[in-house]
Image: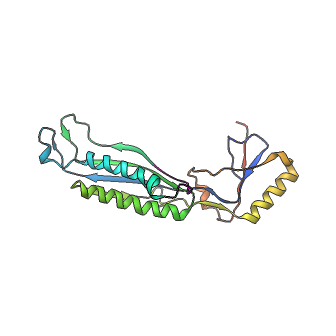
């Protein structure tokens, strides 16, 4: 069971199969050559490379994946220089990758590395990606066992009433409860704050 503030108090919601997305964090670094803004031909601009890279990452979902497979690429930060008259030497950016299946996340991880490294080379830069946080390369997807899910629904109906058991929604949140056994069924129960 997991608490969900979106579900009314006294109601449980669950569904069989994939229920919470596999998630990983990524951090990318694109390195160019710093220099003065008045001599751009002597610089290797990592900001241009990072801009193309971030746009290319957004296309991984819209152009490479089946639209029925739920996936998300979020670039949540970009960090570069702070001088108004110089090209920085390095741009760092990162965010999260999410897929309703663990296999889908593995594919996204591979493609993010290829895109970052490839776009960096196209722009005469070097690119690198790290995909680990807190010692974990990723949180696997939570997949509810169908038989156990049916049992939870049956018990819920008997204890709470027919109208208190509802179909659940898939969730792209990133929580450590993914390391519970893959066969565990989950339901949401709201608590009062």
Please, is residue 127 above or below residue 45 in the view? below
Counting from the top left corner in percent of width and height, residue 117 is at 31, 59
Q: Is residue 37 one of those drawn in magenta? A: no
Magenta range:
67-73
Q: Is residue 76 left or right of residue 80?
A: right
Counting from the top left corner in percent of width and height, residue 57 is at 39, 52
Task: Please say which color scheme the image uses.
Answer: rainbow
Q: Residue furthest top?
A: 84
- Between 161 and 118, the residue placed more toward the observer is 118
Count every numbered label the image shows and give the total.
0
Counting from the top left corner in percent of width and height, residue 156 is at 82, 53
- Residue at left offset 37%, top offset 60%: 113
- Residue at left offset 60%, top offset 59%: 178
Q: Is residue 111 left or right of residue 88?
A: right
- Between 65 and 29, the residue placed more toward the observer is 65
Please, is residue 54 above or below residue 181 in the view? above
Counting from the top left corner in percent of width and height, residue 44 is at 19, 50
- Between 71 and 94, the residue placed more toward the observer is 71
- The image quadrant where one finds the C terminus is top right
């Amino acid at each position: 069971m997991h608490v969900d503030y979106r579900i009314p108090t006294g109601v449980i919601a669950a569904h069989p199969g994939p229920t919470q997305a596999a998630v990983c964090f990524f951090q990318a670094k694109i390195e160019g050559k710093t220099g003065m803004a008045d001599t751009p031909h002597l610089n290797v601009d990592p900001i241009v490379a990072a801009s193309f890279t971030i746009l290319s990452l957004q296309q991984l979902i819209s152009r490479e994946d089946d639209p029925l497979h739920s996936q998300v690429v979020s670039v949540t930060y970009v960090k570069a220089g702070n001088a108004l008259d110089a090209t920085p030497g390095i741009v760092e950016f990162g965010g999260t990758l999410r897929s309703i299946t663990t296999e889908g996340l593995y594919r996204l991880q591979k493609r993010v590395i290829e895109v970052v490294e490839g776009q960096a080379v196209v722009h005469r830069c070097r690119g690198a990606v790290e995909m680990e946080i807190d010692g974990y390369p990723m949180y696997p997807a939570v997949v509810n066992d169908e038989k156990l899910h049916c049992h939870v629904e049956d018990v819920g109906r008997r204890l709470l009433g027919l109208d208190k058991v509802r179909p659940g929604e898939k969730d792209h949140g990133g929580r450590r409860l993914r390391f519970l056994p893959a066969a565990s069924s989950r339901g949401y129960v709201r608590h009062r704050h």
